[in-house]
Image (spheres, rainbow, N blue to C red):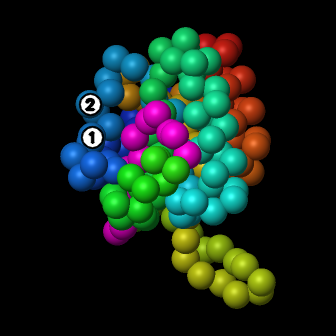
Amino acid sequence: MPAIGEAAPDFELLNQHGKSVKLSDYRGAKVLLFAYPKAGTSGRTVQACGFRDNFAQIETADAVVLGLSPDEPDALAKWIAEEGLQYDLLSDPDHQALEAYGAWGERSMYGKKYMGVIRSHWIIGEDGTVLDEQLKVSPKKSIEKALKFLAKD
């Protein structure tokens, strides 16, 4: 798991169109990378649509948005179409990137423990270093904190 100021782990994953995307493809721009458990559920929709609804502000900060989940590309494409998301969602079914960022771990629901995605986001600088990290963040706080960080930078 990278610390603030360290190099963000590079990855190569498929987007919603089955196209290969590398984090390093975005050098020269800030990247708002967010991890979410599953497309189309309420909390995920709040977070993803919050970034959608504030996309102009994110672009003004010279940043791009990438979503990261274990969902397969076809599920991601369906969700993008349903919600009108204007950024790429990346498929990490083996959770290699999620693990590298510390966003895969033990979770609990209704007293039952399981392994899953820990909702988080990172802001990665133009040079590929981690500028901000928010682990175990609520959907609304994720949006608020990311926008506040990008506005001050």
- Residue at 27% across, 40% down: 22
Mark 1 and mark 2: Cα distance apart in space: 5 Å
Q: Which residues are magenta?
A: 83-94
Q: Which residue is mark 2?
A: 25
Task: Name the amino acid, label 2.
Answer: Asp
Q: Is residue 34 left or right of residue 47?
A: left
The quarter holding residue 133 reads top right
Question: Judging from the image, what secondary structure is the residue with disc 2 in?
Answer: helix
Expressed as whole percent of the image width and height from the top left, the position of residue 48 reads 59, 44
Taking the spot 27% from the left edge, 49% from the top edge, the residue there is 17
Q: Is residue 25 left or right of residue 51?
A: left
Displayed quadrant of residue 151: top right
For the residue carrying disc 2, how many other residues have a C-alpha within 10 Å: few (<14), some (14-19), or many (20+)? few
Residue 43 numbered mark, or none: none
**Dots 1, 2 in contact, CB < 8 A:** yes
Q: Nearer the viewer, residue 104 or 75?
A: 75
In this rendering, position of residue 53 left or right of residue 21? right
Residue drawn at the location 31% of the way across and 42% of the way down: 10
Q: Which residue is mark 1?
A: 22
Q: Is residue 51 visible?
A: yes
Secondary structure beneath label 1: strand
On whether residue 136 falls in the magenta region, the answer is no
Residue type at the position of mark 1: Lys
| Residue 109 in picture, x, y percent from top left | 72, 79
